[in-house]
Image (cartoon, rainbow, N blue to C red):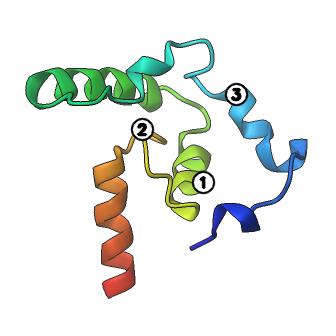
């Protein structure tokens, strides 16, 4: 796993994919849960975010980035923080 301080600095070659995300211009609240959000409200918000991700031309790059840095918050590349944590744990235990 790459640690955030080991990531490349600001360089368009590394980060340009973010400019093409379907989430650009969307309200970031769709992708990040407020404190205490649970149950149906959380599921609805996550489903809205994942629907945006499903149409995104850089979804895989986004997901790869979030997994590489163990992004702790939000929907990235169509995956919630819980889904990413589960996947990363499976990789470590494999």
Q: Residues within 10 Å of mark 3 (few under 14, many from 20)?
A: few
Tell me the quarter of the picture where residue 45 sits.
top left
The residue positioned 54% from the left and 29% from the top of the image is 56
The residue positioned 73% from the left and 38% from the top of the image is 17
Instruction: Give the mark nearest the N terminus, 1 or 3.
Output: 3
Give left or right: position of 37 versus 34: left
- Name the secondary structure under disc 1: helix
Residue at mark 3: 20
Does residue 79 appear anywhere in the picture? yes
Instruction: Give the mark nearest the N terminus, 3 or 2.
Output: 3
Mark 2 vs mark 1: give the one in front: 2
Q: Residues within 10 Å of mark 1 (few under 14, many from 20)?
A: some
Quarter the C terminus occupies: bottom left
Distance between the alpha carbons at the discs numbered 3 and 2: 18 Å
Tell me the quarter of the picture where residue 15 sits.
top right
Q: Is residue 91 above or below residue 17?
A: below
Instruction: Give residue 65's mark.
Output: 1
Q: x and y percent of residue 70 in the render?
A: 50, 60
Q: x and y percent of residue 23 in the render?
A: 55, 22
Kindly indicate whether the residue at mark 3 contacts the one at mark 1 (C-beta within 8 angstroms). no
Q: x and y percent of residue 74 in the render?
A: 42, 38
């Amino acid at each position: 796993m790459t640690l955030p301080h080991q990531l490349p600095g600001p360089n368009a070659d590394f980060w340009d994919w973010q400019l093409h995300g379907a989430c650009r211009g969307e309200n970031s609240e769709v992708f990040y849960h407020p404190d205490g959000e649970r149950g149906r409200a959380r599921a609805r918000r996550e489903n809205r975010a994942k629907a945006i991700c499903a149409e995104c031309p850089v979804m895989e790059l986004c997901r790869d980035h979030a997994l590489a840095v163990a992004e702790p918050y939000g929907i990235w590349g169509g995956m919630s923080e819980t889904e990413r944590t589960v996947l990363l744990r499976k990789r470590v235990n494999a």
